[in-house]
Image (cartoon, rainbow, N blue to C red):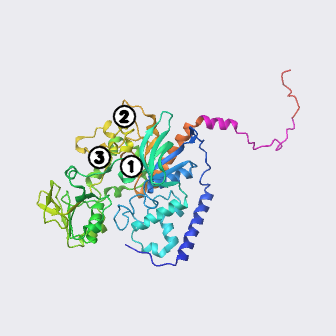
Amino acid sequence: MNSPAARSDTDASDGLAALEARLRQDLAWLELPAPSWVPAHFSDGDRALDVAIIGGGMAGLAASAELRLLGIDNQRVLDQAAEGQEGPWVTYARMQTLRSPKQLTGPALRLPALTFRAWYEAQFGRDQWEQLYKIPRVQWMEYLRWYRRILDLPVQNGVRITAVLPREDGLIELQATGSETGNQRILARHVVLATGREGLGGPFVPEVARALPAHLYAHSSDDIHFSALRGRRVGMVGASASAFDNAASALEAGAASVDLFIRRKELPRINKLTGIGSPGLVHGFLHLPDEWKWRFLHYSAQTQTPPPRDSVLRVSRHANARFHLGSPILSIEVNTGPRAASGTEWLTVETPKRRYDVDFLIFATGFQSELDTRPEFAAIAPQVRRWRDRFLPGADVLNDELAASPDLDRNFAFQPRNGHSCPALARIHCFNHAASLTHGKVAGDIPAISDGAQRLARAIAAMLFDADRERHYAALQAFATAELGGDEWSDPDAGVIAANATP
């Protein structure tokens, strides 16, 4: 991992100030943001938001920024984390650098001065950019904080959404609670769920782990105190990038050993989707027939994404790290006695090869997208159509995770199940990982997040205009600013009666 060479605070500050001035000039030349144009809507004297965005991570910020550029100002981004802690980057993400190549433009929305590269070079110079291997994870979060600040995005932190409730008047009511705001009701015409990798569900833990005492295991997205694992035997379930990042974190914190239990007989080595990455994939996936969408993502899931080479080496350089391939977990037994490295309890993990004793297990087993598991979505979950409700894949490509995906429309919005009628679903937009089967990977990953945000924001702009078409038509009729004064020309035939005019 690269660390930028020291540069004076004055130089860095001056460089960033110059970049910010350039960004403001670029926006002015492009006449952005557009003037606000959406008519106000009120309920019981309170103005409803045009858009409420749940989630202030990268996807939520990009969506908010593009909406603002399109002149949709009456919006708010709501995030339960403290300011600067949104998303995974400084919470449960434990890699040293991003996995994406440094040159990807991420949420810059096709504005060169808004890219990470511009932000980095402004502070550290071109030479340092050329020497940079990959973007340090914490530095990426610093860039996102700057992104939020320079675009003056309306983020409200410390707000947790407890319910999403459709109303008969066409608005969507968000019930929320916060340490500073207490309980509150927020009304919105559109709601965007920018909830990241968790999507609509949450961390997935296999059935074999669900009866374990909570203090003996964690999911890789949990707040794990790695210092408490010093001198302890740690088991890691999974072979994803997060599995290796968490294993390395435990080893670097002084774990006595880390055993990685990997179901596959070999680690995946090829990131298949990288091989076809192109604007064609970004813009064409949405328009594929359903069976081809399923085919692409099923194949990608089956071949799996390999963990980054750096992450694997970060683990394998430790002599006390052990890789157990072809070792799915068959059972886990809770034991008590002096064999525990600390406390009085320890676990025995059984695989097809042998049994292993560990003091703590970490499950890097990903996330699930079952809407029914989130209490805040209880009012809409029974009505939302999933892919499994209308699409039957072939027996050779069955995939429960894909089947649980919401069946979205082209505006990222939910659609009702057969026999259900919930018009509000058309204004609740799923802009997170769960959108992948319908829209492709444009709603959460760095490579295409700008394309996704622009697709979403333009769809919402079109829907808002259509919903207010009568008011816009009335405004069209009422508009009376003349561009001609009547004194720009003269008519030499004025007052002359046409020769063939009928008397």
Q: Amino acid at mark 2?
A: Arg
Q: Are marks 1 and 3 in contact (CB under 8 Å)?
A: no
Q: Is residue 498 magenta?
A: no
Q: Amino acid at mark 3?
A: Glu
Name the residue that disc number 2 marks.
417
Marks 1 and 3, the one that precedes in the sequence: 3
Q: Is residue 488 magenta?
A: yes
Marks 1 and 2, the one that precedes in the sequence: 2
User: Mark number for residue 132?
Assistant: none
Q: Is residue 462 above or below residue 498?
A: below
Where residue 218 appears, x then y in whole percent? 27, 58
Name the residue that disc number 1 marks.
440
Image quarter (top left, top right, bottom left or bottom right) of the C terminus? top right
Image quarter (top left, top right, bottom left or bottom right) of the N terminus? bottom left
**Which residue is more in the foreground, 159 or 416?**
159
In whole angstroms, how far apart are the C-alphas of marks 1 and 2?
22 Å
Per the rendered image, the range of residues in magenta is 470-493
Where residue 89 appears, x then y in whole percent? 39, 62
Residue 497, visible in the rendered structure:
yes
Kindly report which numbered mark, 1 or 3, lies closer to the viewer in this rendering. Answer: 3
Q: Identify the element where label 1 is drawn.
A: loop
Q: Identify the element where label 2 is drawn.
A: loop
Residue 237, visible in the rendered structure:
no
User: Mark number for residue 401?
Assistant: 3
Where residue 149 appears, x then y in whole percent? 53, 61
